[in-house]
Image: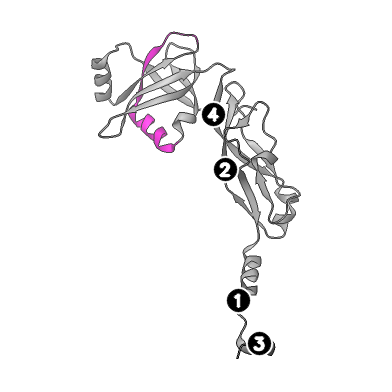
Amino acid sequence: MAGQVPDFEATLRTDTGKGAARQARRNGLVPGVVYGGGEDPIAINVPFNVLFKKLKAGRFLSTLFNLKVDGHDDVRVICRNVQRDVVKDLPTHLDFMRLKRTSKINLFIGVEFTGEEECPGLKKGGILTVVRPEVELVVTAGDIPENITVDLSGLEVGDTITINSVDLPSGAKPTIDRDFVIANIQAPSTLASEDEDEGEEVPADEVPAENVEE
């Protein structure tokens, strides 16, 4: 099942050139261009406030968007470059690339955990510690998974879930070659405290006489 692709609205920019770009910025807009996909490039403007909010949210360059421009069909795009002011570090220009349904892209996909009720480790009081709530995968633009699923049923305290132990959606693969950790089931805090207590120093009057140095 494909994940929800967020909309990104823009307006068509009829005037091009440095003068038009400067005027757009004075009007609270950020100029940009959309290219690729076997079609001619088009010039666009996007609201500065909307763009700034999305940039602050993070992973802007690895998020697939459904670009909506009046007079043009919706198209899936990914941002390939954000130019910034060298002094203020604010966005001044965007480059969006159109994607075909068969295009391969890197996206962060959320991790969903199931089988909690059948997990022996959690029943014993273990704690699920999530190391990676999202995993970066290479996926096909036309078949983006909504999430990857990790089945916790049958796992015990101390067990670790790595990327190689998860069934990934068809056609998807991790961007990292090594077998990294997604989550683990840690011992309950009470058990950890008991283990620490066992390591405490024994009072001298409880130490057998043969172990006491004179």
Distance from disc 1 to disc 2, alpha carbons, whole Å, reads: 36 Å
- The reply to whether dot 1 and dot 3 touch (C-beta < 8 Å) is no
Amino acid type at circle 3 is Glu
Q: Mark 3 vs mark 4: which is more N-terminal? A: 4
Dot 3, how many residues are within 10 Å of its Cα: few (below 14), some (14-19), or many (20+)? few
Q: Which residue is nearer to you in this view: 1 or 83? A: 83
- Mark 4, residue position: 106
Distance from disc 1 to disc 4, alpha carbons, whole Å, reads: 50 Å
- The reply to whether dot 1 and dot 4 touch (C-beta < 8 Å) is no
- Mark 1, residue position: 200
Quadrant into which the N terminus falls: top right
Q: Mark 2 vs mark 4: which is more N-terminal? A: 4
47 in magenta: yes
Is 45 left or right of 180, judged from the image as shown?
left
Q: Is residue 131 above or below residue 149?
A: below
Amino acid type at circle 1 is Glu
Does residue 208 appear in the picture of this structure? no
Residue 188 in percent (x, y) is at 65, 62
Q: Mark 1 vs mark 3: which is more N-terminal? A: 1
Mark in the foreground, 1 or 4? 1
- The reply to whether dot 3 and dot 4 touch (C-beta < 8 Å) is no
Residue range corresponding to the magenta coloring: 38-58
Mark in the foreground, 2 or 3? 3
Residue 124 in percent (x, y) is at 72, 60
Residue 97 in percent (x, y) is at 46, 19
- Mark 3, residue position: 206
- Mark 2, residue position: 133
